[in-house]
């Protein structure tokens, strides 16, 4: 049995991104570009997975270690091109027979496409198989020179390609499958190209052909092999990613009347029959059950919403929010680390942080759980069917008992037992007939002040 290793090339800062963040850590659908590639690589269950990084990429290394502990990091110091990176990867994968090279800046490729490519490589008996595609905008990609019978002869980088090749030939997607026995000796002999001082993996194809080994190309669809070199390309890819995710959601029975205004993350899960109104943003880690409704202008991340629950309009669910069946979180309500039981309601203007709200409890407008004392976070527990009056401050740690009532405007600092009524606010004073006097006093004061000035 032939064993497959995968190398993900991710060295270099990506200077064309023009900012301090490593290119492969830029997010697409809420996940770094490299995370998409690592997930695809892992799905192929390779015998070895290596990620090529340069020593300036410590934050990338930390990400790889956290996200994909099975991957091995290979340092490229200094980064001398994709040819040099592949040579180092080939050295690191031990006795694997085949090496699949993926680029860390090409995030949309799916595992199915790569499986088909691996199959084709085997049946063709090729020494190298290259993934080709024909994107709408071709700038920046290498071009494939094919023989009349379709064999792959060489890959020519854009700056070296003649006009006919630039106009007519398919582009190099940046995915190559290599027979290591054939590629290893040639990888160490790739020339350093003077314009960049780098060796190009793409030059390996001509070298294999010169050594009488056969190379083939397989074509991918025009979108899935798009690479990211600039902010503009990243934004274009985000648009493609969003469109595909929305289509998949609609396909799965999600009701989304204006899909192009809904932003999904790579891992958003929405059950069939759930309604997502226009202008909703999903950050990572959200699960919406079948039959729930997310109303317009809501922002959710790290949240679970059960069937029949309604979120928004204008709600913000932060990580650790869990809404039970039929629960409601309405306008200008923010939740964080908050669990709302079945049918619990916080319909307007509230902050529920580090809180548990029992089944059927009602949280009045303007209620705040004061969860942070400047040093540590504390929990608020609200029992089932409790009623918290408007504009109450619940100073955690504190517990409101089941079926208890908190009077509006209370600042609650001590536990309220089950079924108790707690009111904690200044008493109201009423002074009959005093309003005209008071107005006169205010007017006098204003006149005195004006005279002084
Ligand atoms: C490369 C290809 C081009 C192809 C395009 C597809 C070469 C010479 N050119 O061009 O034919 O059409 O990708 O997107 O391969 N990297 C390293 N070490 C290095 C240099 C790069 O690991 O020394 C990594 C980068 O992090 C990146 C990938 O290799 O993920 C590709 O490098 P990049 O500089 O973006 O190559 P392109 O110019 O896009
Ligand atoms: Ca690139």
Image: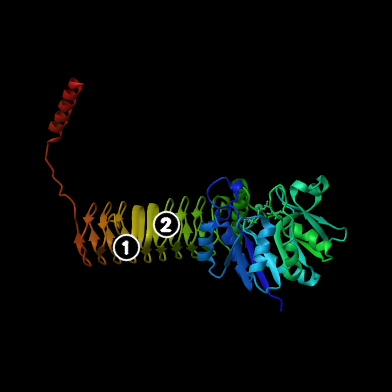
Disc 1 CB within 8 Å of nearest ligand 1 atom = no
The quadrant in which the N terminus is found is bottom right
Q: Quadrant of residue 407?
A: bottom left
Q: Nearer the viewer, residue 131 or 396?
A: 131
| Viewer can see residue 315 | yes
* Residue 147 rendering spot, x and y as whole percentages: 86, 58
Q: CA distance from mark 1 to mark 2?
A: 18 Å
Mark 1 vs mark 2: which is more N-terminal?
A: 2
* Residue 2 rendering spot, x and y as whole percentages: 71, 76
Disc 2 CB within 8 Å of nearest ligand 1 atom = no
Please give the label number shown on residue 282. Answer: none
Q: Which residue is mark 1?
A: 361
Q: How is the image coloured?
A: rainbow
Splitting the image into four quadrants, where does ligand 1 fall?
Answer: bottom right
Q: Is residue 67 left or right of residue 109?
A: left
* Residue 128 rendering spot, x and y as whole percentages: 76, 65
The residue drawn where x is 72% and y is 69% is 180
Q: Which residue is mark 2?
A: 317
Which SS class for mark 1?
A: loop
């Amino acid at each position: 049995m032939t064993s497959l290793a995968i190398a993900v090339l991710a060295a270099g800062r990506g200077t064309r991104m023009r900012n301090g963040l490593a290119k492969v850590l830029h997010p697409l659908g809420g996940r770094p570009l490299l995370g998409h590639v690592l997930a695809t690589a892992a799905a192929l269950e390779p015998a070895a997975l290596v990620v090529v990084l340069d020593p300036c990429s410590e934050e990338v290394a930390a990400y790889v270690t956290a996200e994909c502990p099975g991957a091995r990091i290979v340092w490229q110091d200094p980064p001398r091109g994709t040819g040099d990176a592949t040579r180092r990867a080939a050295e690191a994968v031990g006795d694997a027979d085949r090496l699949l090279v993926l680029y860390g800046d090409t995030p949309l490729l799916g595992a199915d496409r790569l499986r088909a490519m691996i199959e084709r490589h085997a049946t063709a008996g090729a020494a190298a198989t290259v993934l080709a595609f024909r994107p709408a905008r071709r700038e920046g990609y290498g071009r494939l020179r094919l023989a009349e019978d379709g064999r792959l002869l060489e890959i020519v980088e854009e700056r070296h390609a003649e006009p006919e090749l630039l106009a007519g030939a398919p582009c190099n997607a940046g995915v190559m499958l290599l027979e290591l026995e054939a590629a290893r000796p040639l990888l160490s002999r790739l020339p350093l190209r003077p314009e960049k001082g780098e060796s190009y993996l793409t030059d390996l194809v001509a070298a294999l052909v010169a050594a009488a080994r056969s190379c083939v190309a397989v074509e991918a669809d025009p979108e899935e092999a798009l690479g990211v070199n600039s902010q503009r390309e990243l934004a274009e890819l985000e648009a493609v990613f969003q469109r595909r995710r929305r289509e998949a959601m609609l396909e799965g029975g999600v009701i989304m009347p204006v899909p192009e205004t809904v932003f999904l993350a790579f891992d958003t899960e929405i059950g069939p029959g759930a309604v997502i109104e226009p202008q909703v943003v999903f950050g990572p880690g959200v699960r919406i059950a079948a039959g729930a409704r997310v109303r317009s202008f809501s922002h959710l991340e790290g949240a679970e919403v059960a069937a029949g629950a309604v979120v928004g309009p204008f709600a913000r669910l932060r990580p650790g929010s869990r809404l039970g069946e039929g629960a409601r979180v309405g306008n200008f309500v923010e939740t964080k680390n908050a669990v709302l039981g079945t049918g619990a309601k916080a319909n307007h203007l509230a902050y529920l942080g580090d809180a548990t709200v029992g089944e059927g409890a009602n949280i009045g407008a303007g209620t705040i759980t004061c969860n942070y004392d400047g040093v540590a976070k504390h929990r608020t527990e609200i029992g089932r069917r409790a009623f918290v009056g408007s504009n109450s401050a619940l100073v955690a740690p504190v517990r409101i008992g089941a079926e208890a009532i908190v009077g509006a405007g209370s600042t609650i600092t001590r536990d309220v037992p089950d079924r108790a009524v707690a009111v904690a606010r200044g008493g109201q004073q009423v002074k009959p007939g005093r309003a005209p006097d008071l107005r006169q006093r205010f007017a006098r004061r204003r006149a005195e002040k004006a005279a002084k000035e």
